[in-house]
Image (cartoon, grey):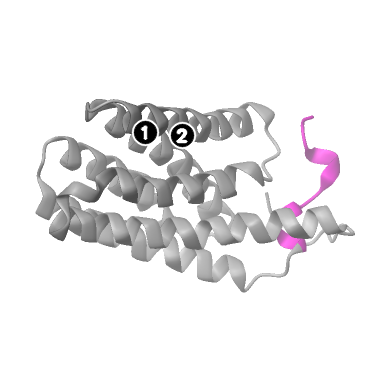
Amino acid sequence: MADPHIKENLDKLDKVSIILYRTGMVVTGLGLFTLALQQMFYPHWFKRVLIVLALGALLQASSLHIYSKVVRWFLVNASWFGLWMLTVAFITTGAWTSYLSLGAFIITFSGLAYKESFCFSLTILKAIPILLIISWLLIILSLNQLATGTLLLSSLLYLYMAWRKINMPLHFDLGDRSKYEV
């Protein structure tokens, strides 16, 4: 989590992990946009779009800089559970595993958006978890047009968050190493 007043020396692994995290934010924003398009125009591509969201979730979760190990564990494992459910969804024909997969990814995206709302002091980012949960419920209820609207809003907010994050110095992401619970 960002402590902008502290500038840790970043090694190559730190820089790579920060770049992967920020890349995951962009992939997630684009994945949410693609999911909105899928809901409106391509109903049979749901599982394929989840692959993009899985990539975004795993890029962010694998490079997560959060002080609390419990929160970090929860967000990372939500991504892994989502990937596992997505794998099961491709093996089986049921839709519920796909819905569970999306729900798990939404847990990760929501937690990260909530975290970043404090880093940027942008209250509007706290709307992302609400919009994503509403989107998930609308998808489950097959209310595709309404889901498209909430997903588009979520996508725009997530991409805005990613743009703001990309324009920050890399050391802002790492913060104070001494505060991390190992």
**Disc 1 target residue:** 101
Query: On the image, which quarter does residue 123 sit in?
Result: bottom left
> In this figure, which residue is indicated by the disc labeled 2?
83
Dot 1 amino acid type: Ser
* Residue 131 in view (yes/no): yes
Residue range highlighted in magenta:
171-182
Question: For the view shown, which residue lies furthest in the front direction?
Answer: 91
Q: Is 181 covered by the magenta stretch?
A: yes
125 within the magenta span: no
| Image-based side of 161 in relation to 3, left or right | left
Query: What's the CA distance linking mark 2 and mark 1?
Result: 7 Å
The front one of 131 and 18 is: 18
Q: Position of residue 29 (x, y in %)?
A: 41, 60
The reply, left or right, for residue 64 in relation to residue 140 is right
- Residue 6 placement (x, y as % from top left): 82, 58
What x and y, as percent, mark residue 130?
Answer: 31, 44
Q: Are marks 2 and 1 in contact (CB under 8 Å)?
A: yes
Look at the numbered disc 1 and give the secondary structure of its residue.
Answer: helix
Dot 2 amino acid type: Leu
State the residue at coordinates (47%, 59%).
Answer: 27
Give neighbour class at mark 1: few <14, some 14-19, many 20+ (Cα, 10 Å).
Answer: many
